[in-house]
Image (cartoon, coloured by chain):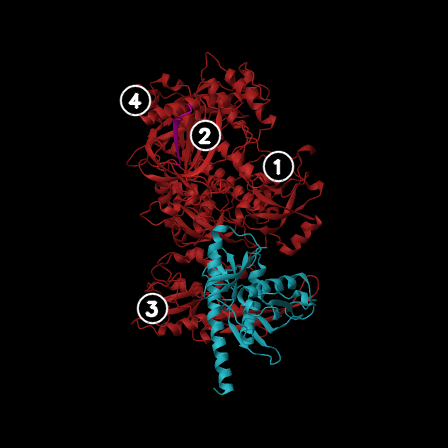
Amino acid sequence: MLKSKTFLKKTRAGGVMKIVREHYLRDDIGCGAPGCSACGGAHEGPVLEPQPQDPASTLCPSPHYLLPDTNVLLHQIVSAWRPGTWACVASSLRPPGSLETYVEQEQGENANDRNDRAIRVAAKWYNEHLKKLSAENQPQVIFITNDRKNKEKAVEEGIPAFTCEEYIKSLTANPELIDRLACLSEEGNEIESGKIIFSEHLPLSKLQQGIKSGIYLQGTFRASRENYLEATVWIHGDTEENKEIILQGLKHLNRAIHEDIVAVELFPKSQWVAPSSVVLHDEGQNEDDMEKEEEKERMLKTTVNEKMLKPTGRVVGIIKRNWRPYCGMLSKSGIKESRRHLFTPADRRIPRIRIETRQASTLEGRRIIVAIDGWPRNSRYPNGHFVKNLGDVGEKETETEVLLLEHDVPHQPFSQAVLSFLPKMPWSITEKDMKHRVDLRHLCVCSVDPPGCTDIDDALHCRELENGNLEVGVHIADVSHFIRPGNALDQESARRGTTVYLCEKRIDMVPELLSSNLCSLRCDVDRLAFSCIWEMNHNAEILRTKFTKSVINSKASLTYAEAQMRIDSATMNDDITTSLRGLNKLAKILKRRRIENGALTLSSPEVRFHMDSETHDPIDLQTKELRETNSMVEEFMLLANISVAKKIHEEFSEHALLRKHPAPPPSNYEILVKAAKSKNLEINTDTAKSLADSLDRAESPVFPYLNTLLRILATRCMMQAVYFCSGMDNDFHHYGLASPIYTHFTSPIRRYADIIVHRLLAVAIGADCTYPELTDKHKLADICKNLNYRHKMAQYAQRASVAFHTQLFFKSKGIVSEEAYILFVRKNAIVVLIPKYGLEGTVFFEEKDKPKPRLIYDDEIPSLKIEDTVFHVFDKVKVKIMLDSSNLQHQKIRMALVEPQIPGISVPMDISNMDSEPGKKKRKLEK
Amino acid sequence: MAGLELLSDQGYRVDGRRAGELRKIQARMGVFAQADGSAYIEQGNTKALAVVYGPHEIRGSRSRALPDRALVNCQYSSATFSTAERKRRPHGDRKSCELGLQLRQTFEAAILTQLHPRSQIDIYVQVLQADGGTYAACVNAATLAVLDAGIPMRDFVCACSAGFVDGTALTDLSHVEEASGSPQLALALLPASGQIALLEMDARLHEDHLEQVLEAAAQAARGVHTLLDRVVRQHVREASILLGD
């Protein structure tokens, strides 16, 4: 049936347009219930479950489908959905414009009412339609709505309807579901009770007006980790002054939560305050003690000189909430039988959240997730609801889950939609795949990776050509062949951005079938690859560069150690070994040349855990060993990345995805220069080249570890390398590698940036077709932004995972004493590095309940004098390491000084735990 | 512009059609007694009227006459009220000249012009309401009008437009879909032989996708052919009843 709609529209220029649209109402949309003879197989897409499971509701004992209305779907589905407890959702199955359920907007009816009516009509239609089913127990469709009027109307029309709360309460099997209901209903009626603490948020329209006229400023709200009564707002835009605004006191924070986008009003200068240095944690359990809060607030206002005053303001409104579910623990209410409890998030910047639950006793001591629902004006804390129980504190799975959630690492299993785009198994290379590809299966290609690596994304070969030159090939897994632009698989990979490697776990960016099988360049199987092939002379000068899609068959998957062994052993002379030797020879030349150009060799203490194969508990820590072969592979990967970067920038000057590493501002190096001076060494930081040279020269015969320490310090001075779109920036330089242009091409299995680069290169060489998003620099810039964020978060997650495993390790090991070097000197503490474990820790010299020692801090030559002992950077000390679990939520490693002995400060050495091999610690970390 | 979702996840277009479906087509032949041939067609909300005169002697300067075949003269115009905004559309503006030219090329390929040397065939098409696919509607209307005039043709000429959205080819685009800026293609097909009388596209589309879109347009044109064929047969049946055969 054809429906025609005619309406008038006023154009921007003032003209009147008459718009006629037609709409085809279909009669071929099935109901989605399997076995429905009336609809036949007309339905495509998701179907209803054949037999709706019986969730044992007392309200409707018969089997039923649920049909929630839009608001229920929006607000409750996330919190209350758990497979098996809800029957299937039917409403999404009926696309608009089905003949039977079409509803026309009536005169005087607004769009929302029409939608409500449409849902009711659909529910009614379903109920009548399902009656025709011959099945003995006819399923019913239950309409779930929270709108009272809507429900009344539905009941009038003979549709079984309940509110969400009624329905969930009636579920006998799952009493805990009720906790997960977002408590939206409370918001309205609570205002009358209790006294109003916060001033009202202004509506968005007023805020926008205010921002436009400059009364208010828009910025990101950042709560302070140390002090819950203080926060800063980073103002958006490029304003020079008032970039950072300080907010102090609960009332002025006005219910803003970390990461929210807020509008702030700036106070006159007379009311400006200085950031306080007090550490304040919210300990209060009772919410009536507002007076106490005020007292605390007064404490913040210490008298300071004018210079310290910073722009101060208050939050007038929230532009965008950036709430997410938060991890943390329950602080059980002191009152027995109470259902209201406070939840303490793991992140100190998030306020405590009030939740209502009946299972407080079971949730105690567990890590849980809670979502915020709202923050009424009369409440000291925001209201939230319980979402998920992660498990016991300290359990490995729980803690891993927590650190993934806290670092916003998407780690859910891949959805059906994503998996549907995977190639069907058994997979083989077809004629079509061979189009635009060269067959390189005859080449003697091999891969070199760390042991246990299943996602092999690079392989190499080297052979002598007839003209005496060398042909070197880098073959990279052709992931972009499997991940086509725009589909669900592509979107998911783009969202994840990177594979995250934790100590005992890997969070894949692409599904396992691709990462460990079809894309992994394993030996003795045909694999699709993207090859970069150079012709070089024996001086490693590139004569010709060729990029091509290819098919390869790797002859061997080696580990770094195996490859090293082959190169070193004189008896082996097979193809693979000669190929490796050729590569190694060239790599050395390349590396030398690169270092001559000013590339930096930096160092960071990297550690690996030896895991128990059964329990996956760390049994030993080991610093990473580096072999010649590591740098051999690295060298060719760098070369490939640089070659590709040049090529794609040549082809797409406006929208190539590149990677840059900005030079750090000179002030960053201050600490390094000062530290070196204390050891009578000169570090020149004018250019990367001079820095590299002076680092090479900075050797001390009596102190071999010094060089590594300096390199570790230098690493801390560096800026973060970032992805960017070539059309949005004009500084392409990579400081650390001393390359004018750089990108990532060699690890498409674990980095999304590489997939984009593969696509760009494929278009550049005519092997693949382009798509509009690829040549849109704004879209590309968005991708870069997400990738940079994901990379940063992945790094943090990795560090957190290492920290957690270090804790586990020391938990099992007990208290140990180790030698350490001082990395930094602070006002009241020293930061030390223990080379044996690659572990860094802080030794505090001030403790709460002990008398304060006499501390003299010198900023010029970084040194700290405690009583009579002076500490300099790079001094060797001995520390005791132990696990501090006084705070259940934040376990940490605590270090205490053993040597040099300072009466009252240092702790006695425990002889039994001393390491018996002092020589081992001095192993130099050469890189 | 965030834009309209042209193709929903369930595979429906804005107006409820699926990707490969045509709009509702209604047509009538012999709408004017005065002309030699005439037809009226509705493709959804796009409505066009075609009138054919000829073959007759060359009007105007005789020098235009072609010694070996007939001259096909096509004129396109659209009514002031044909679009959402009322707008005077003078004759001879660029758009109508171009469409006229395209129609002429199309019909020179289809009409057996060599049967009428030194004569002229006039095809006048007017669009009464435009809602996407004007060229296609004009061609389809003109085909019926030429058939009505009894001018011998190689085959029907059936035209249809096709676009490309989210990796799927959409056929018979409506105005909303055309305005979205995605690539679109107009195809005039001689269905029996599968020959292409005219193919026109003025947006960028990667050659890998061209085949898919072309095939979708051809499929739709064949669909149009079945409908037009039914209209012609119906018309002939009615005419023969009137004639008393």
| Residue located beneath label 2 in the image | A534
Rate crowding at label 1 as few (under 14), some (14 to 19) or many (20 or more) other CA atoms within 10 Å: many
Q: Nearer the viewer, residue A496 or A894?
A: A496
B103 sits to left or right of B211: right
A137 sits to left or right of A218: left
Of all chains in the rendering, the one displayed in red is A
| Residue located beneath label 3 in the image | A61
Marks 3 and 4 in Cβ contact (< 8 Å) = no
Rate crowding at label 3 as few (under 14), some (14 to 19) or many (20 or more) other CA atoms within 10 Å: few
Looking at this view, name the residue that lies furthest to the bottom: B244
First-in-chain label (3 vs 1): 3
Q: Chain of mark 3?
A: A
Marks 2 and 1 in Cβ contact (< 8 Å) = no
Closer to the observer: label 1 or label 4?
4
Looking at this view, name the residue that lies furthest to the top: A701
Count the labels in the image: 4
| Labels 3 and 4 within one chain | yes
Residue A572 numbered tag = 4
For badge 1, the amino acid type reads Pro
Q: Disc 2 versus disc 3: distance between alpha carbons?
A: 73 Å
Q: Chain of mark 2?
A: A
